[in-house]
Amino acid sequence: MNAVEGSAALTPAPDGTEGPEADAERLAAQHKQEFEGFAKKSYHQAERVLRAGCSDRQTVEDALHDAYLHARVKWEKLRDYDKPIGWVIKTARNKILKEHTRSRREAATAPHELPATSTADVADSHGAQDALNRWLQRIPPRHAEVFQMTQEVFTDQQIADTLGIAERSVHHYRALALKRLRELAAADGFTTPCRSPREGGDRGPR
């Protein structure tokens, strides 16, 4: 191959187009913009789901930071997923579980001894949402995750795929979560505080 032939790929195409390198740059810029929009739109939703099962805000934020970094690298593939946020939640959740396992091993604590959230007065400005966040920390983490993902309008199949459980388990855990949350709500003076979107109904204090 002579010098003229070797430099052909670096010259503009005969029809005036910029060639494959420019196309690749445009595609990369498009994917970057798409991902930034996805991250901005989905972050707080993912955070709410993860905090339903883990009360330590810093642990959740660290896990989400790592998950979104991985998602950025894999975005060309993830962008075609039906719900890319499910992949982010699953990745962050796995990191949280590993961190909890490491912490329990170091501190020799029982699996259920996770940091508790501060108790919020149900009469303060945050009202029912603060109370619900507190109650979620008092039920099994898997039940809390299923309940919160239902609140975020994930389908049962999406919840099952994200958490790695059977769809029938989603139904079971949600029913248990609702039962226990209602008991906790009644004890705190609330009525119908935690209906899922599929049940309808209002929430609020007596």
Image: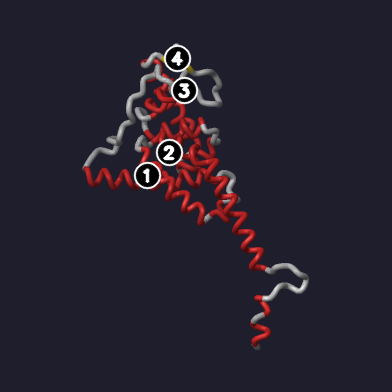
Q: Which residue is mark 4?
A: 205
Q: Which residue is mark 2?
A: 50
Q: CA distance from mark 3 to mark 1?
A: 25 Å
* x and y percentages locating residue 203 in the rendered image: 49, 18
Q: Is residue 122 placed above or below 87 in the rendered structure? A: above
First of labels 2, 4 by sequence position:
2
First of labels 3, 1 by sequence position:
1
* x and y percentages locating residue 55 in the rendered image: 36, 35
- Seen at 39% across and 46% down, the residue is 62
Instruction: Tell me whether the residue at label 2 lies in contact with that at label 3, contact meaning CB atoms closer than 8 angstroms.
Output: no
Return the residue nearer the eye: 178 or 39: 39
First of labels 2, 1 by sequence position:
2
* x and y percentages locating residue 149 in the rendered image: 49, 34
Give the residue at the far right of this rendering. 15
* x and y percentages locating residue 177 in the rendered image: 42, 27
Q: Callout 3, which amino acid?
A: Cys
- Seen at 54% across and 26% down, the residue is 197
Return the residue nearer the eye: 52 or 57: 57
The label nearer to you, 1 versus 4, is 4
- Seen at 65% across and 65% down, the residue is 22
Figure quadrant of residue 189: top left
Return the residue nearer the eye: 177 or 125: 125
- Disc 2, SS: helix
Q: Is residue 165 placed above or below 1 in the rendered structure? A: above
The label nearer to you, 4 versus 3, is 4
